Structure formats: structure tokens, C-alpha cells
Image (cartoon, grey):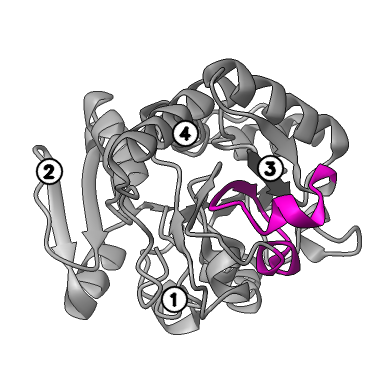
Amino acid sequence: MIPFVGRVSSEEQDLWIKTLSTAMPNETVVSFSDLSHEQKHQCELAIVANPDPEDLVALPSLKWVHGLWAGVERMVHELPEASFSIVRLVDPNLASTMSEAVLAWTLYLHREMPTYARQQKALSWLPHPMVSAKNRRLGVLGLGALGRASAERLVENGFSVAGWSRTPKHLDGVECFSGEQGLRLMLQQSDILVCLLPLTKQTQGLLNATRLALLPDHASLINFARGAVVDDAALLAELDSGRLKHAVLDVFVTEPLPLNHTFWQHESVTVLPHISAPSNPQSASEIVASNIAHYRETGDIPTSVDLTRGY
């Protein structure tokens, strides 16, 4: 018996349990709340979606948990001394979905859509010169599975693309940077900066006033990573001054974004409700099923999160 442990709506939980059960008919997937005291003491693995840490503590025989999302920073933060392994979802479908979103919103900024939307409201008929894709410099922060797929998709669409990662990497057609000096150099040449970094102790507040000031005048930001990677006050200051042109934000420190937050009404901010790359229940369930089947056969737990790094 495998418990589903998550702080999600009952409708979302029912969908996941149904889809997971279809993907692995030899397993019994049930809601954590349906487990008896004895069953809780017998579970050695669980499937999780933003789980309540107290629920996981109530499973004393737990060896590992399989997440249904790519991000695991909240679980790592809430369970810093977890006695079990945490396996994050690595879904090629998710990388493709994210790269599609990155391309879509890059084009939104590249073709000056925020400007033309404002002009429409003002009844202003004013064409602006178009910049070719090869002359628009894109910077991608984070070159993991999502960042790599996104950078490659931008290259395929003719953009000049650079990427930054914690350790050196190589991608065809992408100018790769690493380390603190590399970060400075990449920021200085990014007309549109795409943030896809995991949230860790090292990346929290990474895009602060000092680093945002390195971006070229009239640069724009896309944050599809986590809200806490960006210093909100510093970003607002740059937008209010007009030095930065626009920010497309899909993630926030507090979600849903509070109704009184400045971002909602700011003419230089596009607010999205964390929709850039949702997990696909079908493909995610198939991956989870494959990993659990392999574990049943061999006893090997899939590659787990490094708690010291946070991903």
C-alpha cells in the first residue's frame, strides 16, 4: 500500500490517485487520511505533492518518497533532517512544457507586446523598430533539465543565447558561464533574463539590487523558478525607475499572490498564477510507476535529492 500525501485540493488528490492507480495496477495507492495506525507503520514509500511534514513523520518505516513536482525546496526546508530519501520528478514532458512557456513569453517581450498593449489602452498608434532574434541577447539562469531544454529551444528560434550554472556545462549553440564572475558577465549581456534556478540557500535572493543593476538598460526579466530567488523590492525599484523594462512573473514568495501586492497593478509586470510548467498527471504517473517497479525488483531507490544542495 502506497499513501498519497499532499496539501492539495480533494479534487486534485482524487485525480492523482486515479491516474497513479491506472499506471501501476499492481500497487494500491490511497489517501494518507485513509490509512489505519497499523498501515502507517508499515509504509516504506509514499507519493507526495507538497506534503505536510507531520504526515510524513507519522510514517516511521518510510524509506523514500517520490515527489510529483520538479521542485522540492519546500520539503527540504521543512524536513532538513529527513531520515528518508526524497526523489524529485524528472519528466521530459515537463522540460518540453517549460521550454514552450519560456519561448512564448520571450516572444511576448521580444516583440514588445506589453508596450503595444499599453498603447492600445491609450489609443496610441505608434510602431516601434523591430529587433531581430539574432540580435536579442537571452540569458538563462540555471542549466538543469528545464534550463537546458529552454536554452536549446531559444537557440532553435534564432535567439542569441547564453546560460549560467553553478558548475561548468557545455551546450551546443549556447555561451555557457559558471561561478560568480561568470554570473556577472552573463547578466551584463542579457537583454531578457530567464530565471530557472532551483531555490536553495545559495540562490535565495540571488537576483538582488546589486545583480539586477548589472542587467543592461531596458532589459526584461522572466522568473519561472521560485519567487524567493528575486528580491521583490529591488525589482520594483528597477521597474519604477524605468531602467528595467518589464517582468513576467509566474512565481512569488507568497502564493496565491496577495490581492494588495503591488505587482497586480504595476504596468511593467505581467502576473501569472504559477502555470508555466504544471506536472502532467499522465506522464508523471508513468515515471513514478516505472521508478517504483524498479525499486520493487531491485531494492534500489532512484537518484535522490542532495539535502545539502537542496536539489
How crowded pointer 3 is (Cα within 10 Å; few <14, some 14-19, many 20+) is rated as many
Looking at the image, tell me whether mark 3 or mark 4 is earlier in sequence order. 3
Q: What stretch of residues is rendered in magenta?
A: 34-58
Image spot of residue 208 (x, y percent): 49, 79
**Distance between the alpha carbons at the discs numbered 2 and 3:** 38 Å
Look at the numbered disc 2 and give the secondary structure of its residue: loop
Residue in the foreground of this view, choosing between 284 and 53: 53
**Distance between the alpha carbons at the discs numbered 3 and 4:** 12 Å
**Distance between the alpha carbons at the discs numbered 3 and 1:** 34 Å
Looking at the image, tell me whether mark 2 or mark 3 is earlier in sequence order. 3
Mark 1: amino acid: Leu
Looking at the image, tell me whether mark 2 or mark 4 is earlier in sequence order. 2
Looking at the image, tell me whether mark 3 or mark 1 is earlier in sequence order. 3
Q: In the rendering, which numbered label is found on residue 171?
A: 2
Looking at the image, tell me whether mark 2 or mark 1 is earlier in sequence order. 2
How crowded pointer 1 is (Cα within 10 Å; few <14, some 14-19, many 20+) is rated as some
Mark 3: amino acid: Phe
Q: Which residue is mark 1?
A: 206
Q: Which residue is mark 3?
A: 4
